[in-house]
């Protein structure tokens, strides 16, 4: 079956027009039935697309791959687009197809010597501070408020905190004043001369409480982080645990050992999220201590040097049995949670701090953090990044190597694809078993 796509992209001095993509006939059946194509059919489509592109240009540029991927996804979104299980597009929606086509071209051209004059150096996109936000820097003051009146409310909040402590965050007047002074908080956090976390905390101490941070996150992103994460860590956490435990022999020793520990001890509902995140860190070969720290006594700052990047600190013998939680950043504890708070509460404060305080993901845990962002919290910006590091530590050799800055972490999208394929496959197998 022949599908003609009118397509025009300038790649250097080469103008590519009217690219004819031969798509396998079964594509229409898959599209109409909204079901997933097999791996063989996916590879056939990718080979066909690449062959058609290379008729015009042997080594197309990335912009050419992206234009073709965008056309295909817009024409057949149910078949090729990246979706979350909620039906929301994952980032731009065509990242996985773009990466597959690009990988296929690189494979075909693996024995060819690249032309050094064919491409020019690309500028890496800088960090977008408003990454994933909907209300990053408000410009209008609340009705009836001016800078002077907001400054007065800020001093009132400081007076209340100094006399009553963080527990006063539950007072209705504190809640109202924190809401009204949101614009002032943003102006301080987002100013050109970035302040340290300690400087921000000194001026807005109520922001460093679970309620204050969660309310600020809600205004920034439109998401109730406590509600969303508490539900997602249980439901999606169980799916992740099932994915790994159903394929035990497929994994390395570290993952198998953790699965065995989870199964032997049993996982309480409020620990499902912790178990799922630990499994993902094993899968990505990211060290647990790049996100978590454990301690058996207080005060932490006096007993050890805390990391400069954010950490979720668990008081207890082991991560799975921790009974008290704190969040640290820039070498100091910034939030202490109440003893009745559970893992989901701690994780919501920890993850929310990256957005509220405008912090980058640490490279050593960037894949896990982006999975939490896109899968659990469902923040899916098309552009920008929360990790701009241009170097990384090789998981194989332990040496420092160059790192490519991308809009969407390929490790996160690959896992989500595999999870979706696994669940689709197992659900079909279960249907056949009942026939």
Image (cartoon, rainbow, N blue to C red):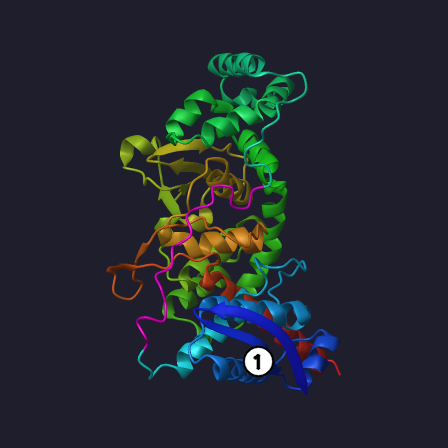
**Nearer to me, 435 or 405:** 405
Residue depicted at x 62% and y 46%: 228
Q: Is 186 part of what is drawn in magenta?
A: no
Residue depicted at x 35% and y 51%: 389
The answer to whether one can see residue 259 in this image is yes
Q: Position of residue 216 (x, y in %)?
A: 56, 32
Residue depicted at x 34% and y 30%: 299
Q: Position of residue 241 (x, y in %)?
A: 53, 62
Q: Position of residue 260 (x, y in %)?
A: 45, 65
Q: Secondary structure at mark 1?
A: helix
Q: What's drawn in magenta, residue-wise?
A: 114-133
Residue depicted at x 72% and y 82%: 29
**Nearer to me, 240 or 5:** 5
Q: Which residue is mark 1?
A: 42
Q: Is 132 part of what is drawn in magenta?
A: yes
Residue 141 placement, left or right of 264: right
């Amino acid at each position: 079956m022949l599908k003609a796509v009118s397509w025009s992209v300038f790649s250097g001095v080469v103008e590519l027009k009217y690219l004819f993509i031969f798509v396998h006939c079964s594509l229409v059946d898959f599209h109409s039935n909204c079901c997933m194509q097999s791996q063989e059919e996916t590879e056939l489509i990718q080979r066909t697309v690449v062959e058609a592109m290379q008729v015009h240009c042997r080594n197309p540029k990335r912009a050419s791959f992206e234009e073709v991927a965008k056309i295909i996804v817009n024409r057949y979104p149910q078949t090729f687009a990246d979706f979350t299980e909620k039906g929301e597009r994952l980032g731009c929606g065509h990242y996985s197809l773009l990466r597959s086509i690009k990988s296929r071209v690189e494979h075909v051209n693996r024995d060819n010597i690249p032309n050094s004059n064919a491409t020019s150096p690309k500028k890496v996109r800088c960090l977008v501070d408003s990454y994933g936000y909907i209300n990053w820097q408000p410009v209008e003051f609340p009705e009836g408020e001016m800078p002077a009146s907001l400054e007065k409310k800020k001093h009132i909040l400081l007076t209340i905190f100094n006399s009553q402590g963080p527990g006063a965050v539950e007072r209705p007047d504190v809640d109202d004043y924190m809401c009204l002074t949101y614009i002032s908080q943003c102006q301080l956090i987002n100013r050109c001369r970035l302040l340290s976390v300690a400087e921000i905390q000194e001026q807005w101490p109520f922001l460093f409480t679970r309620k204050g941070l969660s309310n600020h996150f809600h205004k920034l992103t439109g998401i109730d982080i406590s509600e969303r994460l508490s539900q997602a860590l249980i439901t999606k956490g169980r799916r992740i645990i099932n994915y790994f435990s159903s394929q035990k022999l497929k994994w390395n020793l570290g993952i198998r050992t953790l699965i065995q520990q989870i199964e032997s001890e049993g996982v309480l509902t409020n620990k499902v999220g912790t178990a799922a995140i630990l499994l993902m860190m094993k899968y990505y070969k990211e060290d647990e201590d790049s996100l978590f720290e454990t301690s058996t006594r207080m005060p932490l700052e006096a007993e050890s040097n805390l990391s400069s990047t954010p950490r979720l600190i668990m008081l207890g013998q082991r991560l799975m049995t921790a009974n008290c939680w704190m969040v640290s950043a820039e070498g100091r504890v910034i939030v202490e949670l109440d003893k009745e708070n559970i893992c989901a509460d701690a994780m919501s404060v920890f993850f929310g701090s990256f957005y509220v305080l405008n912090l980058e993901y640490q490279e050593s845990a960037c894949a896990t953090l982006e999975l939490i962002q896109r899968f659990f919290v469902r923040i899916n910006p098309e552009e920008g990044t929360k990790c701009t590091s241009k170097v990384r530590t090789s998981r194989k050799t332990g040496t420092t190597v160059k790192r490519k800055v991308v809009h969407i972490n390929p490790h996160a999208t690959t896992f989500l694809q595999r999870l979706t394929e696994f669940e689709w496959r197992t659900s079909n197998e279960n249907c056949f078993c009942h026939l």
